Image: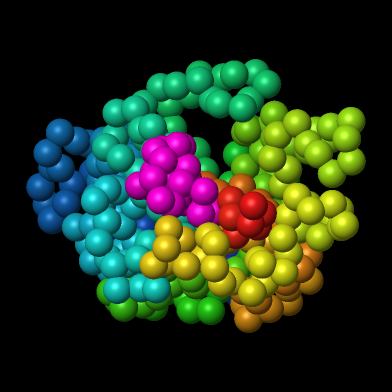
Amino acid sequence: MSIITLAILLAGLWSSATAGQWHVGESLRCQDCHLQHATQDGEQVPGGPYSTMLLEASVNELCLSCHDGTDPTAPDVQSPVTMYSAGSTGESAAGFFGQVGVDNPHGHGLGFGAVTPLQNQGLFVQLNCAACHAVHGNGNYRNLLIDPAGVGDSLAVVEGVHVFTEFSPANPPTVAGSVAAYDRDNVGYKEGMSTWCASCHDMLAANEQSSTTAHFNGHPSDVALDAYSPYNHTAPGHWTAGLGEGFDLADGGVARVPFDSPGATDYVSSRAAGLSDEVQCLSCHKAHGGAHAGGMLWPYREGGAEYLAGCQQCHNK
């Protein structure tokens, strides 16, 4: 089998397995990121040529050359972000980064060396986009790496199995298509995200049960809201109703936080609140980061009228 034939076959397989993704299958376009002969339009790239014939000097610079808001058809992941302002929550599912090379107290920092928090080894790392995403695509949702910590994991977070979306990005990309595809409300979850995050943040890999029933030595994840009934630490009925404390936007509430729906089979069922829904990492934190300290979805650390909003949705104390 020739290399070209094999490449076409693989492209077809990835395309069919990863609906709704980008930089994979038919949307994996070499020219988006690479030069063929280390020149562009017959001219040498300023400062180049760069490693592996990239269009930019580093992975972060390359990714952000499209994903910094300058290309309105690409999801914007660098502050300030305005492309989702017309949506129901006004934000994307993953949130946004600060500036490269600067500490980001509001989430993950790109190009800034730091000790990995909540990790047993406490490794010093300097993150780039490829630390979490497979740049040439794979079978996972948003091309998330199958082994982000490099410890031999094989973590599946597959769209249509573990995660569900209603709208896929347009191909070729459009402004409206990208806004719809990456809007926070376009994603529903069944399982797998907490396990993926805990690959690096492995201190959170297991829920440490306290000696008292229904108590934990830290906030648990992947535990059903009604798992310890009749202990009234959670309020499943309040969660499913979606009204009042924590939810009322006019009275210090926020949009319903993301959650795992263990019985989900499609987008609609993954978005329907139920008594046995589970908290996962993205229920409280943005994957990239956001407007609040710690990447939180609400201003828990800053205080103010909304500082307990996300807590109240599940606990209503």
- The way the protein has been coloured in the rendering is rainbow
* Closest to the observer, 143 or 245: 245
Provide residue 7's location: percent of width, then percent of height. Answer: 54, 63
Question: What residue is at 84 percent from the left and 52 percent from the top?
Answer: 231
Q: Is residue 220 visible?
A: yes
Provide residue 23's location: percent of width, then percent of height. Answer: 44, 60
Q: Please determine whether, in this image, residue 297 is positioned above or below residue 238.
A: above
Q: Quadrant of residue 225?
A: bottom right
Is 295 magenta? The answer is yes
Question: What residue is at 47 percent from the left and 42 percent from the top?
Answer: 300
Is 118 magenta? The answer is no
Magenta-colored segment: predominant secondary structure:
loop
Question: What residue is at 37 percent from the left and 62 percent from the top?
Answer: 91
Provide residue 229's location: percent of width, then percent of height. Answer: 87, 57
* Closest to the observer, 254 or 10: 254
- Which stretch did the figure color magenta? 287-310
Q: Is residue 53 visible?
A: no
* Closest to the observer, 45 or 247: 247
Q: Is residue 90 left or right of residue 18?
A: left
* Closest to the observer, 16 or 170: 170
